[in-house]
Amino acid sequence: MRILISGASVAGPALAYWLTRYGFAVTVVERAPALRKTGGHAVDLFRPAMSIVEKMGVLEQVVAKKTGIEWLTMHREGESRPVELELRRVMSAVSDRHVEIMRDDLSEIFYDATRHDVDYVFGDSIASISEDGEVAFDSGRTDVFDLVIGADGLHSNVRRLVFGPESRFTTWIGAYLAVVSVPQHLGLEGRIESVAGIGRMAGVGRTRHMDDARAVFLFRTPEQLDYHYRDVPRQKELLRERFQGLGRQVPRLLEELDRTPAFYFDSITQLHLDSWSRGRVTLVGDAGYCPGPAVGGSTSLAVVGAYVLAGELAAYGGDHTRAFPAYEAEIGDYVRRSRTFAVNAAKRIVPGTRFDLWALAGLVRLINHLPMALTTAASKISSKGVRLHDSIALKDYDSTPWPRSFSASS
């Protein structure tokens, strides 16, 4: 049985791993000419995703590539004294098993775990998908697949082709995120230096494995901004406008915008679809149910979604009419709770008023002074809050008696 996956970032290779393990023949098509290795931005893997990484046999590689960032120094606009936060205090409250890793490092690890068993096609993209599984590519070639899966991110091409325009499914939750590669000039290995103002926050840090540093910008606006998601010059212009006048290291970071080798800018937006499946096509990860970049744990959700989708397809012998609904039912609660968490996080992560800025500094001081065991215990009282990831129970598909009615060569 032949399955085509669009997207070779995180969800695509993770899904390809599990599908090939269960005997499916997998092709992954990626628009980029090669695997992206520009460093990307930091993402989080929480307990359920870490368990899957361990099952994949790549736990050692993932842990070896963790960012190693342990401290955050926050300067407040108009205040002379900074506050410092030991980040493991926060993360231990969120999850008892966690790794922060650069997105492209994670993508490369998953790719390396699958490249000998999966047919990767770079520099091409899907142009059309027929109801009977015939796929036309931008390159002009055509092929036939039993199933097509969109793992191509928030701005999914597969979703657009099969479900319609992106605007029908997106809900903006009030903020924007930018990540910029910048020269390392502050000696910040293992630390983030940030400055927070009303409605905006910028920080810069460096991981243990990178020669350069990453600058992160978060800001809120009362209304959505007008720009195209591929219009990088316009995005840089918007970023300069929003962070003009914010002091400390920010002017120097903005000067790097025209020289940076890697730039990411996007709205913090959720996707809401009634179903992620239509006929032979389904969606996984951000392509189907992005809870919001940077605030909703979308990478962990994508890894879990890939594991569940492959497992349900194996459990139903490749019968997508049964497997796709089972996949949606199994992952649905995690998706809905991640959305709720993301909306609340987007409201709190960037101070909206002078009082919010003061309260954020007070919260940091409180976290630093509370015993870590008390902070962790308090967070476990309700799984609906910060511990939502650790409350997810994974199915053991290896013990599922599969019908095995499909053939990898069919």
Image (cartoon, rainbow, N blue to C red):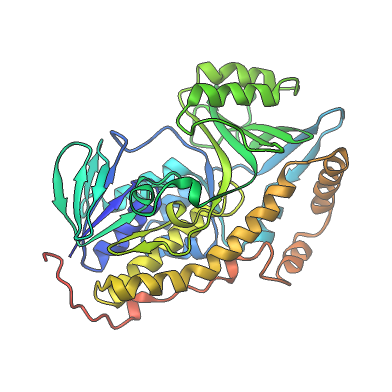
Residue 11, image x, y percentages: 39, 53
Picture residue at 60% right of the left edge, 16% below the top: 255
Left or right? Give the position of 91 relative to 197: left
Q: Is residue 65 in view from this perspective?
A: no
Q: Quadrant of the C terminus?
A: bottom left
Question: In the image as oriented, which residue stretches furthest toward the left?
Answer: 409
* Residue 123 in the image: above or below residue 256: below
The image quadrant of residue 90 is bottom right
* Residue 117 in the image: above or below residue 213: below
Seen from the viewer's position, the closer of residues 334 and 37 is 334
Question: In the image as oriented, which residue stretches furthest toward the bottom?
Answer: 401
Seen from the viewer's position, the closer of residues 231 and 60 is 231
Left or right? Give the position of 384 relative to 42: right
Seen from the viewer's position, the closer of residues 150 and 212 is 150
Residue 122, image x, y percentages: 25, 39
Q: Is residue 48 in view from this perspective?
A: yes
* Residue 84 in the image: above or below residue 81: below
Residue 260, image x, y percentages: 50, 21
